Amino acid sequence: AHLEAAGHVCVLKDAFDFESPSEIANLILAENCEAALALHLYRGGRLLQGHQIPFGIIFGGTDVNEDANQGEKNTVMGRVLEEARFAVAFTESMKEMAQAQWKARQISLAVTRAVPVQPHAKGKIYVQSQGIATTPNAAFNWNTFLQRSEINQSADNLHIFLLICGLRQVKDPLYLVDAFSEWHQEEPSVYLVIAGPEVDPVFTREVKAKVRRAAGVRLIGEMPQEDLHAVVKNCFAVVNSSVSEGMSAAILEAMDLEVPVLARNIPGNAAVVKHEVTGLLFSNPQEFVHLAKRLVSDPALEKEIVGNGREYVRMYHSWQVERDTYQQLISKLEGSTED
């Protein structure tokens, strides 16, 4: 939307739909593409190498946090970063990790080649946090949603905790299931609803089997964004239990919609959630339950967290600022490298 608003014509494709760079070459030819922007340094970036069209990269999170630790992927990503005209990190710490990662690789290359080499990442990485704009569906029926989710209780007494994630291992959707189920048996008004697309088919089967056996836990599929925002607005709190995050849009959207956030204490989450200020951070399932109980019983804490979260998103995650940044960065893809 940001790029089209500046007059560019965009073709949006899922990196998972492509097996090899040659398929991208066909796409570039068919669509007469003049530039490219890839999300995820490995999954998207590796497909763009060597096509003679300028491109930029947006780090996803798992590329810097996870894939960079695997030798072969690290090498590929270093080459992609070398060829990219710019890269975008969501946080300062993500930028520092990327710079340290690929600067180290360059030093080792320079030693083996015995020639000076320019660091891949130097001066190329820009920090731009995700801009947030929420659009909850005003016509959404919360009671119908609860019935469809097989939660047969009065909405007034319920506390719905919503975990939004694609079903894949890095999101760790099962992390809290046992502890939450135990809590639900003590307190039947609390439910954990896991919402998101079935990204990894094998892992999805494992999640479904576990949730079927877990009291007080429900699994719902992917939803249109406006409906999902309406669910967020109606739920008691949004939960994030990921092993690794770049920057969770779900957390920021919850803050924007004035809903409290409980997030696993990992670097990506701690960059946006300040404990007891803009949300609550937990380090294990037992601590999650303790903090969730505290939030349920302390409306003053809930009110304070919600107010601070909304203010934080307005100040640091402006949709307009994000738009301005990408419109400026895309100009680096116009013309030759020397321009």
Image (cartoon, grey):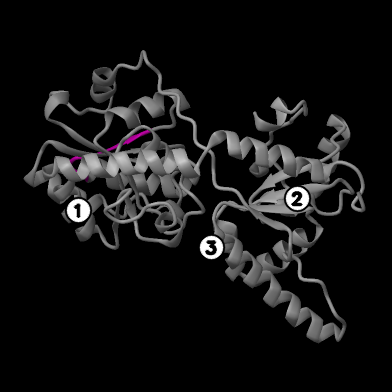
180 relative position to 37: left or right: left
What is the three-letter code of the residue carrying label 3? Ser
CB under 8 Å between callouts 2 and 3? no
Q: Which image quadrant for residue 169? A: bottom left
Residue 36, by quadrant, is: top right
Location of mark 2 (residue): 47
- According to the picture, the residue beneath numbered tag 1 turns out to be 291
Query: Separation of disc 1 and disc 3 at Cα?
Result: 27 Å
x, y percent for residue 8: 77, 29
Residue drawn at 52 percent across, 38 percent down: 318
Say whether disc 2 or disc 1 marks the residue closer to the N-terminus: 2
Magenta segment boundaries in residue numbering: 214-220
Residue in view at x 70 percent, y 46 percent: 38
Q: Secondary structure at mark 2?
A: helix
Q: Which amino acid type is marked by label 2?
A: Leu
Q: Nearer the viewer, residue 268 or 169?
A: 268
Above or below: residue 135 compared with residue 301: above
Residue at the disc numbered 3: 93
Q: Mark 1 or 3 closer to N-term? A: 3
The kind of residue on which mark 1 rests is Leu
Left or right: 167 as drawn, with respect to 185: right
Q: Is residue 20 visible?
A: no
Q: Is residue 58 left or right of residue 177?
A: right
Question: Whole-percent x and y of residue 128?
Answer: 60, 48
